[in-house]
Amino acid sequence: MKVEDIARVLDAPIVCGEDQMQYAIEVAFASDLMSDVLTLKHDHVLLITGLANTQTIRTAEMSDIKCIVFARNKKATPEMIQMAKENEIMIIECRYSVFKTCGLLYQEGVKPVY
């Protein structure tokens, strides 16, 4: 599923990386524990989290994750957006809970990491 389709399904704005909306996501992973994210060995991962801070951006960078959905109506700060731009990471801000976000995407065919 492409990032633009994810944003449409979630009725959520892409606040960083609008120029990369054609990027294809193969699997999704939901976690607020960045140590769990660091264990992932997949490509084209969508990270769904309610942890909105610079550590999330750094973790995505280290894990080669190119798209993050901030659930629970969390907002990216200007510092987070700047870091994401520097690392070509897309950010989507979603008003839904992590559970609902995952369910909507799963219903549309996004596969889990495991």
Image (spheres, grey):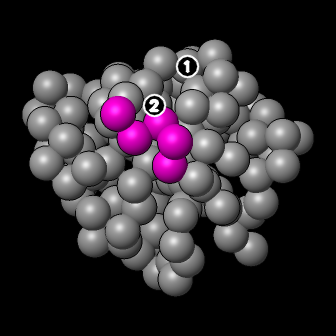
In this view, 11 is above or below 3? above
Tag 1: amino acid: Ala
Q: Position of residue 19 (x, y in %)?
A: 35, 33
- Which callout, 1 or 2, points at the residue further toward the start of the chain? 1
Judged left or right of residue 60, residue 42 is: right
Judged left or right of residue 80, residue 112 is: right
Decide whether residue 20 is among the magenta residues.
yes
In this view, 57 is above or below 80? below
Q: Position of residue 110 (x, y in %)?
A: 76, 52
- Pointer 1 local density, CA inside 10 Å: few below 14, some 14–19, many at least 20: some
Give the labeled residue for mark 2. 92
Task: Determine whether label 1 and label 2 are within 8 Å by CB.
Answer: yes
Residue farthest to the right, as pictured: 107
Occupied quadrant, residue 111: bottom right
Could you say whether the residue bearing mark 1 is in a helix, strand or loop?
Answer: loop
Q: What span is colored magenta in the figure?
A: 19-23
Tag 2: amino acid: Ile
Q: Quadrant of the C terminus?
A: bottom right
Give the labeled residue for mark 1. 12
Q: Looking at the image, which is closer to me, 8 or 51?
A: 8
Seen at 35% across and 24% down, the residue is 15
Can residue 50 be seen here?
no
Q: Position of residue 12 (x, y in %)?
A: 55, 19
Occupied quadrant, residue 112: bottom right
Occupied quadrant, residue 99: top right
